[in-house]
Amino acid sequence: MFAYWFLYLLPAVPAFIGVRPRNMFSLSWIAVGLLFILAIGYRDEVGGDWGNYLIHYYHFTEAPINELLASDPGYRLLNRLIAEWGWQIYGVNAVCGAIFILGLLAYCRQLPAPWLGFAVAVPYLIIVIAMGYTRQSVALGLFFLALADMERGHFLRYLLWVSIGTTFHKSAVLLVPLGIFTTHRQGWLWRSVAVAAAAYGLWDLFLEEHQDYLWREYVDKQMESQGAVIRVWMNLVPGLLLLVYRKRWKELFPAYSVWFWLSIAALIGVVLVGYATTAVDRISLYFTPLQVAVFARLPLLLHDRFPPPLLRFSIVMGYATVLFVWLNYATHAQYWLPYRNMLLQRDNLMQQDDWYYRPIE
């Protein structure tokens, strides 16, 4: 468990103190980002789907090109490319981890409290998602890049990042409609037409032939994800805070409409999670940026009501509690423990006898 606590404390300590990196290329910012990329990329047999991703890696090394392009082509082609370079599954995970961390850092950097935003992301977004749901973590990292551009009013860049994310996990197509709410010099009608065209094209390319299967698996069969209720509530809390203080948010921060609708979606997720647990749980992963965006801005949002150091301390301790509970009581935490990293092991050969197979989340 020490490794996970160490990773959390790296951003949590400067977050509590209130330190802000001078720029995107400050040494501390780069060093922490690189360390997290190595921690994600070179983990060994860590994560609930490790065995399944490993099997897929070897399958994609020899699969015909038409199969590589059939579903989530970005991830499948990345596996083939890494295999040709001889980097093994660790190369795939390192590239995916780099995309996620760079997207997260790019978004956190424009927050009032960058280290606080990064600390909020560690317990669930990084340790659970980036180290467990590899494909969807790439889509989420690209979504962070898209959000950073959206808050700066770059509509087309938002669509670009989300479109690339869809090639790694088809569910990211659901994020396209948010582009309508980008503040942009072009009118609402133009954005609506562009979003409709992009959504239709991505749906036709990546999702249409799989929609019946996905509905059967995630809705009709009533698949359940343990801990889904807790995870959707984690999104609801920042969503409610944003809705309660919406007037002040509009005055201080950009892209209110985007965060408003994500907050509404988080509220709907709480209502629907009992009916389609796994489906809502997977979609709610894309609402998790609410936690980063809201909590990293809370000390500024409420500075006239509560002392900012108190708010920073409360948030840091709150997510420390999240990490403690997950590591000690989560059903699937056993697949993350103990943490192992290939760069720290004497024997870097994988023990294939220890493989295990579980369905990919």
Image (tube, rainbow, N blue to C red):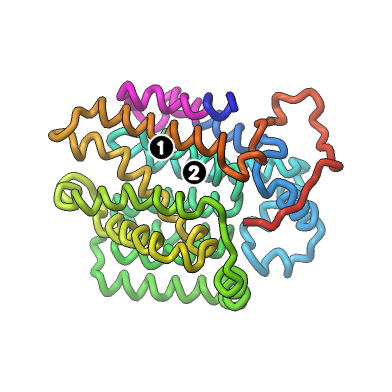
In the structure shown, which secondary structural element does the residue marked by tag 2 occupy?
helix
Q: What stretch is highlighted in magenta?
A: 7-32
Residue 242 sits inside the magenta stretch: no
Please tell me which residue is depicted at 40% across the width and 48% down the height of the picture. Answer: 234
Is 55 left or right of 121, judged from the image as shown? right
Type of secondary structure dominating the magenta stretch: helix
Alpha-carbon neighbours of circle 1 within 10 Å: few (<14), some, or many (≥20)?
many
In the displayed structure, 305 sits above or below 190; it is above
Q: Which residue is drawn at 68% across and 30% down?
A: 341
Q: Residue 120 carries which label?
A: 1
- Identify residue type, mark 2: Leu
Alpha-carbon neighbours of circle 2 within 10 Å: few (<14), some, or many (≥20)?
A: many
Quadrant placement of the N terminus: top right
| Residue 10 drawn above or below residue 47 | above
Q: Which residue is drawn at 24% across and 55% down?
A: 256
Residue on which disc 2 sits: 125
Specify the quadrant of the image occupied by residue 296: top left
Q: Does the magenta stretch include residue 21?
A: yes
Query: How far across and down, in percent of the image, does residue 135 sit?
Result: 60, 53
At which x and y percent is residue 95?
61, 43
